[in-house]
Image (tube, rainbow, N blue to C red):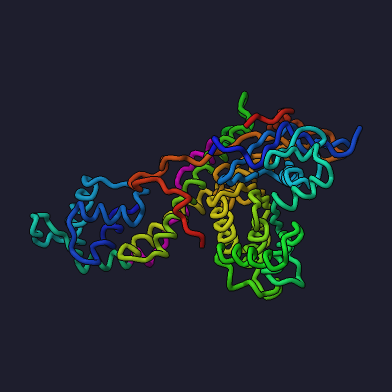
């Protein structure tokens, strides 16, 4: 994993809101690298800087200082056009409230980013259907968002985030509006996309969802204070034979 | 943990010998609570003394088989019907540790909480990985399905338990921060628990 170039690198990231007496240090020197195949969960109390980190990683906000490198491009020095292209082609978002366009079907929602990339409508639809099929969501292709459950909409949103060549998915509390069973299935899908080679960053305050990640990073007052790495060996329980590999785990 | 009742439950499905009981117990619970054969035979001895099981011949390989008695079935039924006692909670080292850390000189309670949180979330990561694997096994079906479902239930119990612990740790930290921050407009009360300022720089990772 570490031999590959990271998809996302945050280097000494600082974000200060306001100035003088009202100055707030939202992020204080964050360093983080996310590799292909890796799902990283970011946890921390509210106000610890989780969401700021994610919006800056996705180029929706700029840091006060530090670098954000997505697929070898530093988005803090990229031009506006380059940034817009990078956001379209390399970065997928998943929000708490799904953010699907209500007037478009699932397939049209997934095809949209590709059409914006300049891909023909026909090809974009083919790609969208393939993406939905790959995530076992083919049966939802012609449904409108209000004809789908929250969990289905969120899974379609993940398909949209990763359609085409996108390898980076940034998910901000993607399970926030879902019951825990459905939340689990959304996490299982995110997990399987990362196993298939995507890099994911998941912001959550729910430990049981963070537990699906390879690495859990703890944020406190804008700084990374600690992190866990899942064990490679089956260290916790004996008698299980070989340690489970995420790659063998089917999506639910 | 009731090995006694666990063995009775397995024997209700038919006569079995000691090491067979051990294997079946572990495949149901994923070896979360490993048993040794000695414990199994000691327990069988006590169950026999109490009239809940009897020895019933041998199999072809010469293993002594044990069978459940009517008394054993009645005991088992009572066990399933009776809730597990929660009125005298087992001693919890973590709760005791945090209780002792409040106001303890030279102890940064937030560090105590964080180091436990890391450990607990890590355990959840590992349990979750095992759970995903167990789910795959259950969905694939097959002859071991009943054991796989039992193991899945045990794993989920471990996940719920660690989750409750992680939530409780978050709660403790939030409460300590609240208590150490004087309400606006009041004289700062002497803080009983020191919550240190965060380090200005993030740790490199």
Tell which of B140 and B115 is nearer to you: B140
Judged left or right of residue B53, residue A109 is right
For the record, the magenta segment spans B78-97
- Count up the numbered dots: 0
For the question of whether residue A42 can be seen, the reply is yes
Residue at the (56%, 63%) spot, across then down: A135
For the question of whether residue B88 can be seen, the reply is no
Tell which of B163 and A71 is nearer to you: A71
Give the x, y percent position of residue B192.
69, 32
Above or below, B129 relative to B84: above
Give the x, y percent position of residue B30.
36, 52
Give the x, y percent position of residue A203.
67, 48
Residue at the (57%, 54%) spot, across then down: A193
Outermost residue to the top: B106
Image quarter of the C terminus of chain B: top right
Q: Is residue B82 magenta?
A: yes
Quarter of the figure with residue B51:
bottom left
Q: Is residue A114 magenta?
A: no
Above or below, B29 relative to B170: below
Quarter of the figure with residue A57:
top right
Tell which of A77 and B39 is nearer to you: A77
Give the x, y percent position of residue A129.
62, 67
Judged left or right of residue B72, residue A217 is right
Residue at the (76%, 67%) spot, across then down: A101
Residue at the (28%, 47%) spot, across then down: B35
Judged left or right of residue A75, residue A237 is left
């Amino acid at each position: 994993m570490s031999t590959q170039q990271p998809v996302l690198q945050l280097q000494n990231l600082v974000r200060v809101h306001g100035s003088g007496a009202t100055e707030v240090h939202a992020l204080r020197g964050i360093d983080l690298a996310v590799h292909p195949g890796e799902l990283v969960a970011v946890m921390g109390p509210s106000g610890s800087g989780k969401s700021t980190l994610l919006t800056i990683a996705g180029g929706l906000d700029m840091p006060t200082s530090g670098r954000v490198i997505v697929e070898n491009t530093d988005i803090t020095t990229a031009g506006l056009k380059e940034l817009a292209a990078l956001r379209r082609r390399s970065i997928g978002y998943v929000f708490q409230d799904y953010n699907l366009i209500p007037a478009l079907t699932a397939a049209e929602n997934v095809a949209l980013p590709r059409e914006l990339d300049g891909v023909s409508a026909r090809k974009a639809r083919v790609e969208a259907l393939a993406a939905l099929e790959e995530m076992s969501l083919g049966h939802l292709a012609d449904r409108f968002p209000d004809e789908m459950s929250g969990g289905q909409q969120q899974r379609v949103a993940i398909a949209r985030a990763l359609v085409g060549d996108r390898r980076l998915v940034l998910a901000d509390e993607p399970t926030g509006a879902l019951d825990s069973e459905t939340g689990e299935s959304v996490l299982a899908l995110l997990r399987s996309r990362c196993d298939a080679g995507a890099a994911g960053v998941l912001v959550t305050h729910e430990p049981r969802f963070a537990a699906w990640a390879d690495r859990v990073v703890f944020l406190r007052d804008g700084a990374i204070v600690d992190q866990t790495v899942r064990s490679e060996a089956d260290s916790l329980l004996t008698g299980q034979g070989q340690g489970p590999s995420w790659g063998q785990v089917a999506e639910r | 943990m009731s090995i006694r009742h666990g063995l009775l439950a397995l024997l209700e499905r038919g006569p079995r010998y000691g090491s067979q009981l051990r294997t079946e117990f572990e495949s149901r619970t994923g070896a979360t609570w490993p048993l040794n054969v000695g414990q199994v035979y000691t327990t069988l001895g006590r169950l026999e003394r109490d009239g809940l099981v009897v020895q019933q011949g041998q199999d072809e390989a010469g293993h002594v088989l044990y069978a459940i008695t009517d008394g054993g079935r009645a005991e088992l039924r009572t066990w399933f019907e009776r809730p597990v006692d929660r009125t005298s909670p087992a001693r919890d080292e973590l709760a005791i540790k945090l209780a002792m850390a409040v106001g303890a000189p030279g102890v940064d309670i937030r560090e105590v909480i964080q180091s436990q949180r890391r450990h607990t979330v890590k355990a959840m990561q590992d349990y979750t990985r095992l759970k995903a694997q167990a789910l795959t096994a259950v969905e694939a079906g097959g002859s071991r399905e009943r054991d796989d479902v039992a193991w899945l239930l045990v794993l989920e119990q471990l996940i719920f338990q660690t989750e409750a612990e992680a939530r409780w740790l978050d709660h403790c930290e939030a409460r300590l921060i609240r208590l150490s921050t004087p309400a606006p407009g009041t004289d700062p009360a002497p803080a009983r628990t020191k919550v240190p300022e965060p380090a200005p720089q993030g740790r490199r990772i």
